[in-house]
Amino acid sequence: MTRTGWRDYAWRLIHAGPQQPVLHMALDEVLTDEVAAGRRPPTLRMWEWPTSAVVIGRFQSLRNEVDMDAARRYGIDVVRRISGGGAMFMEPGNIITYSIYAPEALVAGMSFQESYAFLDAWVLDALKALGINAWYQPLNDIASPSGKIAGAAQTRRRGAVLHHVTMAYDIDATRMLQVLRIGREKLSDKATQSAAKRVDPLRSQTGLPRAEIIQRMLATFRELHGLQADVLSPHELALAQALATTKFSTPGWTAAIP
Amino acid sequence: MHGEYKMSGGKLVVADLEVDAGRLCRVQISGDFFLEPDSALDVINAALEGQPAGADATQLAHAVERRLEAGMVLYGISPAAVATAVRRALGDAA
């Protein structure tokens, strides 16, 4: 496979209004497949959502990661995504999450580790422009002097790569730890998980509203790689709504690893 | 039985399993690692199913290694890390 460059594609941006977490799971699958099939140009999608959710990785055990009683008590949805990696905690406005859907040719010949850093290089530029000194920390984290800022996850399907990233804007760590079970073993090399009440590197280090940071990020992507506003087609939305119902809302998927 | 292991520079690997008549059964590996394709997880679980509970980490790692198919990619996890998580589930000291 010959490697392509960012500028070989006419990148599209999808930044719709708030959508349910389970629909985001489905959109990631549908849009990856649409790019793989050549029906959609490579796309950057920025997420917005109106409700709270825990999103666990493809290979995580539901009961090992999530206190389901607590999730029910606080009205927090629990969903499983199609990529590996760790659990994330989303409340409206607390994180910035985006997905990149690209042909695998864009990362042809790269190791997984190289492809993670490559696909997020524009974000490091955007963060620097916002005054944050950030770097890629293998395997899949973006870090700054004050700790982890973001976590990335990838999966590859039919010749396309899905690369999505969640960045901490202003997280209520107390609530997060009430629903997520963060094991002792996992904490063994993360000294930063102390008694912090908030995890807010982007808010505290930029002093900017979330929406402003997103606009600055999109401006950086546009400048580096080109980016044209787009919307979901009715067909894509219908496919995603169907998958949200038939797959991502079902216990068979969410508890695939109980 | 439950064991966890985070390999250095890698991700967390969790093993949940039972032992019946001296052999591993109902083996479920999980964690925040990455596998391509995702069916590789079933292959890893199946490789461990039925292994002797007395098998050491090297033997368990080989059992996993042998079953992995061409084109399967493990990221943040290795057969050795899986074997260590399984041995911990079986009661080996952390």
Image: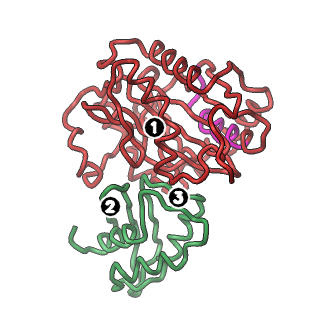
| Earlier sequence position, callout 3 versus callout 2 | 2
Q: Which mark is residue B35?
A: 3
Instruction: Calculate the distance from the C-alpha at mark 1 to the C-alpha at mark 2.
Output: 25 Å
- The type of residue carrying mark 1 is Val
Camera-side mark, 1 or 2: 2
Q: Which residue is mark 1?
A: A54
- What coloring was used for the rendering? by chain
Q: Are marks 1 and 2 in contact (CB under 8 Å)?
A: no
Q: Which residues are magenta?
A: A18-33
The quarter holding residue A28 reads top right
Q: Position of residue A100 (x, y in %)?
A: 59, 35
Q: Chain of mark 1?
A: A
| Dot 1 crowding, Cα within 10 Å, few <14, some 14–19, many 20+ | many
* Residue A88 spot, x, y in % from top left: 43, 38
Q: Name the kind of residue labelled 2 in the image.
A: Met
| Coordinates of residue B42 in the picture (x, y in percent) | 56, 67
Residue B54: percent from left, percent from top: 33, 86
Residue indicated by mark 2: B7
Q: Quick check: B93 above or below A198?
A: below
Chain A: drawing colour? red
Tell me what residue is drawn at x 21 percent, y 71 percent: B93
Q: Check disc 1 and report its element: helix, strand or loop.
A: strand
**Magenta segment, prevailing SS (helix, strand or loop):** helix
Mark 3: give few (<14), some (14-19) or many (20+) Cα within 10 Å.
many
